[in-house]
Image (tube, rainbow, N blue to C red):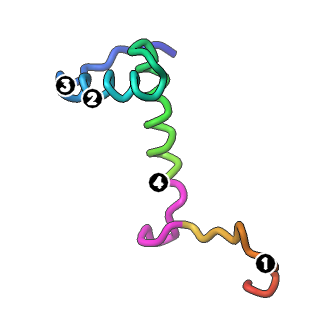
């Protein structure tokens, strides 16, 4: 989907700089904005029921059943 965004000048310069450092060019600003928005909304979804603790992960534990 295409849309138009009004971005402040300083923020745009930061986006261009970050895009060049990540992807090697300034043409990937849309890709970078998409990544930033995805990570922002995914982080919001991973909060606990009360919003003060991130969701627990049992990844990396040897025996998950012993720790539940």
Q: Nearer the viewer, mark 4 or mark 3?
A: 3
Quarter where residue 68 is shown: bottom right
The residue drawn where x is 51% and y is 39% is 38
Residue carrying label 4: 44
Q: Which structural element holds mark 3?
A: loop
Looking at the image, is 68 positioned above or below residue 15?
below
Q: Cα distance, mark 1 to mark 4?
A: 25 Å
Dots 3 and 1: beta carbons under 8 Å? no
The residue drawn where x is 31% and y is 25% is 17
Residue carrying label 3: 8
Residue carrying label 1: 64
Q: Callout 1: 10 Å neighbours few (<14), some, many (20+)?
A: few
Residue 14 circle label: 2
| Prevalent SS, magenta region | loop
Q: Nearer the viewer, mark 1 or mark 4?
A: 1
Q: Callout 4: 10 Å neighbours few (<14), some, many (20+)?
A: few
Q: Nearer the viewer, mark 1 or mark 2?
A: 2
Q: Cα distance, mark 1 to mark 2?
A: 43 Å
């Amino acid at each position: 989907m295409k849309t138009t965004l009004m971005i402040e000048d300083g923020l745009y310069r930061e986006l261009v700089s970050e895009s060049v450092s990540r992807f090697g060019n300034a043409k990937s600003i849309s890709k970078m904005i998409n990544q930033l928005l995805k990570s922002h909304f995914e982080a919001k979804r991973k909060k606990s029921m009360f919003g003060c603790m991130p969701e627990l992960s049992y990844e990396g534990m040897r025996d998950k059943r012993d720790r539940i």
